Amino acid sequence: MSFPKLSRPLLRHAYSTSAKPRLNVPIDFNTTPLLHHNHKSFANTPGLPTGPSKRMTLYQAVNSALQTALASSNQVLCFGEDIAFGGVFRCTMGLQAEFGPDRVFNAPLTEQGIVGTAIGAAAEGMKPVVEIQFADYVFPAFDQIVNEASKFRYREGSTGGNLGGLVVRMPNGGVGHGALYHTQSPESLFCHIPGFRVVVPRSPSQAKGLLLSAILKSEDPVIFMEPKILYRAAVEQVPEESYVLPLSKAEVIKPGNDLTIISYGRPLYTCSAAIEAAERDFKGISIELIDLRTIYPWDRRTIIESVSRTGRAIVVHESMVNFGVGAEIAATLQDSAFLHLKAPVKRIAGWTTHTGLVYEKFIMPDVARVYDAIEQSLEY
């Protein structure tokens, strides 16, 4: 489909005083189509059981997954800084009381020690789930992750030894007031190293299924990055029973024909709002929205097939645009779908700067930036 040139100044909708609705308004989590506001919509999400459900926040869904994993296997351990009383975000609340201090316990303030201990436990057959209090604090453990855990299965060779069940959980991303040391999204650093899976859930139901898969099913260690702004903001119905969702498999949240937007975690809600506004303003278009879920190793086939069909692509993430996840996806599409492209692949991401306290909202992608990218791609 071809589209007429759209003669609108950039960002007009974001700041206009006309009758047109503003774009940069708070996301309404009570109405967003990305959440299951009742259990009847479970059938629309592959892998979700359709039995009894309970309304949960994201942190409660993480807690439910940890409780389910601890109950299912005595090999599962849970430790980290302050997790015995529930942790900073209350994700481990009540677990020590139920499973005892031998399986759920506090660790000293040493990230490299936490991950190093987990590697040793996993090498001996345990399934340690450890928490780094904030993703910003993971860097002291970088050597243990990159030089030890990620190489373990390769070094074991034909023995079959692996660190499956080792999960490093961490809250990541912006929260509106996190400043330098509570806003970082370092996922792309870990995506450069083979041997780990890197997972970012978008919602409570996704968090539970993906975390259980990481703990109980994966033969690779997993870095599980939880968007902390969603811990309490995202509330939905979550199946009560145990279930797993596949790792390294993207999900088409919303089908479309004219453009593909690829994202993960919190920015998916921004993308959904921008898509709603664009489909309202640009009559006759439909935009596909894909959640990567696992950003490494990522689901190339789903993305390439979608973009080959729509001919246009935008990648959106919070982490800095330079050398980010979007760069890898754009390069892959250029290599594998070049002859299908009707416009350059666009990247909408965090600006390449440290996050000052009062500037966070200007650094992260917002609805207006995604809307403008949609407009530019359609009229290219």
Image (cartoon, rainbow, N blue to C red):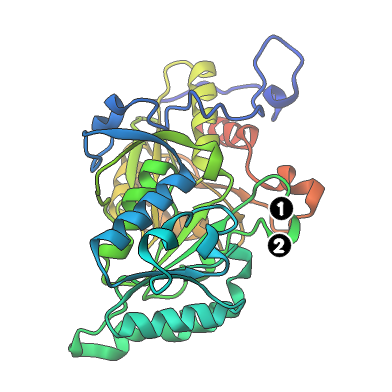
Looking at the rendered image, the quarter that the N terminus falls into is top left
Q: Which amino acid does label 2 sit on?
A: Tyr
Q: Where is residue 157 in the image (x, y as percent from the top left)?
A: 23, 89
Q: Which residue is drawn at 57% across and 69% down?
A: 81
Q: Position of residue 46 (x, y in %)?
A: 24, 40
Residue 296 vertical placement versus 326 (above, below): below
Residue 108 vertical placement versus 64 (above, below): below
Query: Tag 1, which secondary structure?
Result: loop
Q: Which mark is residue 220?
A: none
Instruction: Give neighbour class at mark 2: few <14, some 14-19, many 20+ (Cα, 10 Å).
Output: some
Is residue 380 something that shows in the picture? no
Residue 279 vertical placement versus 352 (above, below): above
Residue 38 vertical placement versus 46 (above, below): above
Is residue 13 something that shows in the picture? yes
Residue nearest the observer in this picture, 258 or 319: 319
Q: Are discs 1 and 2 less than 8 Å apart at CB? A: yes
Residue 183 placement: quadrant = bottom right
Distance CA(mark 1)–CA(mark 2): 7 Å
Residue 67 placement: quadrant = bottom left
Query: Tag 2, which secondary structure?
Result: helix
Q: What residue type is labelled 1?
A: Gly
Residue at numbered disc 2? 181
Q: Which residue is drawn at 69% across and 58% down?
A: 352
Residue at numbered disc 1? 178
Q: Where is residue 110 in the image (x, y as percent from the top left)?
A: 60, 79
Q: Residue at x 22, y 39 (%)?
A: 49
Residue 217 placement: quadrant = bottom left
Q: Left or right: where does residue 285 sit relative to residue 19? A: left
Q: Which residue is drawn at 20% across and 84% down?
A: 160
Residue nearest the observer in this picture, 68 or 229: 68
Q: Left or right: where does residue 295 sit relative to residue 227? A: left
